[in-house]
Image (tube, grey):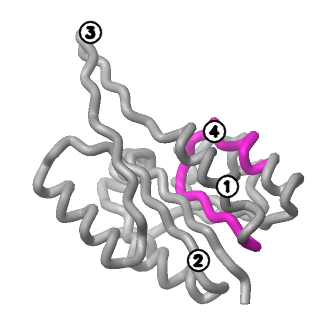
Amino acid sequence: MKKIALFADVQNIYYTTRQAYGRQFNYRNLWQRVGTDGEIVSAIAYAIDRGDEKQRQFQNTLKQIGFEVKLKPFIQRRDGSAKGDWDVGITIDVIGLADKVDKIILLSGDGDFDLLLDKVAQDFAVETEVYGVPTLTANSLVESAGIFYPITDDLLI
């Protein structure tokens, strides 16, 4: 049975599914789909914490499904822009688990992860898969993934 590590870029998926479909992503359906291909030995969801009650309920749902939830505080800059991405944290965790699993699955459309997927596939001979919104996923990420799965109706609420 394949050992699988699953990494979810929550903010990226929230905004891309909302923009493309006006709907939310169904993490439970993803878990069930991925679980048919092996054992999920690690699943981490990376999110920004705004201290919102609805957000806490969502985070608890992710935990009930089986995800470890990692949070960073939401930072509002003086100029009105916001900061709070998990690119470095996701990268560190992926590299840290790459030699312990057979497959890495990334849930994101962020092209910054293309080099990461190339590296782990080459250095650790691990399979890589990406789930993303087709029109909002960087071409470089699609090309770097061993398999790209478009987020479609069956993965939406």
Residues under numbered marks 2 and 3 in contact, where contact means CB atoms less than 8 Å apart: no
Work out whether mark 1 precedes mark 3 in sequence or the reverse, and give the earlier one: 3
Instruction: Depth check: give the residue in front, 30 or 67.
Output: 67
Give the crowd class for mark 1: few <14, some 14-19, many >=20 residues within 10 Å: few
Q: Is label 2 in a helix, a strand or a loop?
A: strand
**Is-magenta flag for residue 107?**
yes
Q: Name the image quarter holding residue 80.
A: top left
Work out whether mark 2 precedes mark 3 in sequence or the reverse, and give the earlier one: 2
Which residue is identified by label 1? 96
**Quadrant of the snapshot with the C terminus:** bottom left
Disc number lying in front (1 or 4): 1
Q: Give the CA distance from mark 3 to mark 4.
A: 26 Å
Which mark, residue 111? Answer: 4
Q: Amino acid at mark 2?
A: Val
Residues under numbered marks 1 and 4 in contact, where contact means CB atoms less than 8 Å apart: no
Report the span colored magenta: 101-118
Q: Is residue 66 above or below residue 111?
A: below
Which residue occupies 61% across, 84% down?
A: 39
Q: Amino acid at mark 3?
A: Asp
Which mark, residue 79? Answer: 3
Work out whether mark 2 precedes mark 4 in sequence or the reverse, and give the earlier one: 2
Residues under numbered marks 3 and 4 in contact, where contact means CB atoms less than 8 Å apart: no
- Res. 26 visible in picture: yes
Work out whether mark 1 precedes mark 4 in sequence or the reverse, and give the earlier one: 1
Where does residue 87 sit, x and y in percent of width and height? 54, 39
Q: Give the CA distance from mark 1 to mark 3.
A: 36 Å
Where does residue 125 sit, x and y in percent of width and height? 87, 63
Q: Amino acid at mark 1?
A: Gly
Q: Name the image quarter holding residue 53.
A: bottom left
Which residue is identified by label 2? 41
Q: Give the CA distance from mark 2 to mark 4.
A: 25 Å
